[in-house]
Image (cartoon, rainbow, N blue to C red):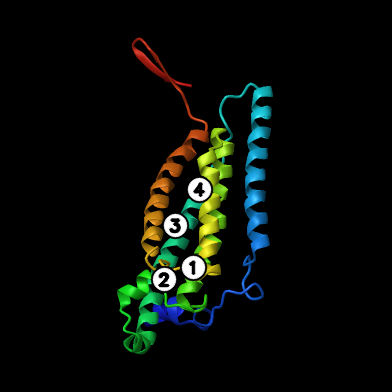
Amino acid sequence: MTTFNYYLAEHPTIVNFRWSPTQSYASTWSFLFTAVSSYIIAAVTLHLLLLITLSLSNRRRGFSLGPIPALHSLTISIISAVIFVGILLSAAAEIRDTRWLWRRTRTTALQWFLCFPVGTRASGRVFFWSYAFYLSRFLHLFRTFFSVIRRRKLSFFQLINQSSLLCISFLWLEYSQSFQVLDGDWVAWRVFSVCRKLSSHSVRVYDGLPRRRTLYTPGQTRRL
């Protein structure tokens, strides 16, 4: 348990983390705008190309991706679980290390959860896991492309949802927003949601595999 806590809350990389354009990857406004616009353009372009290709080939269904969506969902679920545990351990460590300051300012743990003190900088344990969550949002973008390729469907809501969550997680870090710790509950819900989708993806994998048909005739059953 000590080793587990060290690598999730006490490692020097986590403790000394600082959100900075010079020290953190993908931490600039230009990168965010470029990533979001590229994501939307790529998704719309892929959707149009598939519509043209499938209409010319008279194909009604999309293409099967095999186990790739299931493996993608499994990867996200593992990452989300690690982030959830890491932010809980980091929050407990921050409370332990800064309790002396709270006594002077008459701040309670609940108040710290709900609203960071004025002047809080995006550094330390909690913001490290917020940064990890921000980076994990880029992996979620692939779900849109999977949906387009498999179902020939591009949802406007999905584009807005994925883009807005990416921007919100960026704003957490850029402006040291509060509610980051409590939003770990939201991450837990995402873990459950992803695991549920993982099971559905695993079932859909078999839809793309060839199956033997059973021909029923009076008095006998023959497999083709």
In the rendered view, does 4 fall on the left or right side of 168?
left
Question: CA–CA distance between discs 1 and 3?
Answer: 16 Å
Q: Position of residue 63 (x, y in %)?
A: 59, 34
| Callout 2 secondary element | helix
Give the quadrant of residue 40: top right
**Tag 3: amino acid:** Ser
Where 18 falls versus 39 (above or below)? below
Q: Position of residue 65 (x, y in %)?
A: 56, 41
| Callout 4 secondary element | helix
**Contact, CB < 8 Å: mark 4 with mark 3?**
no
In the rendered view, does 209 fall on the left or right side of 183?
right
Between discs 1 and 3, the one toward the N terminus: 3
At a point 37% along the width and 88% down the height, the residue shown is: 101
**Tag 4: amino acid:** Asn
**Contact, CB < 8 Å: mark 1 with mark 2?**
yes
**Tag 2: amino acid:** Ile
Q: Which residue is mark 2?
A: 87
At a point 68% along the width and 61% down the height, the residue shown is: 30
Q: In the image, which disc is placed on residue 77? A: 3
**Contact, CB < 8 Å: mark 4 with mark 2?**
no
At a point 64% along the width and 27% down the height, the residue shown is: 54
Which mark lies nearer to you, 4 or 3? 4
Q: Which residue is mark 1?
A: 130
| Callout 1 secondary element | helix
Q: Which residue is mark 4?
A: 161
Give the quadrant of residue 52: top right
Viewer-closest of 179 and 158: 179
Between discs 4 and 2, the one toward the N terminus: 2
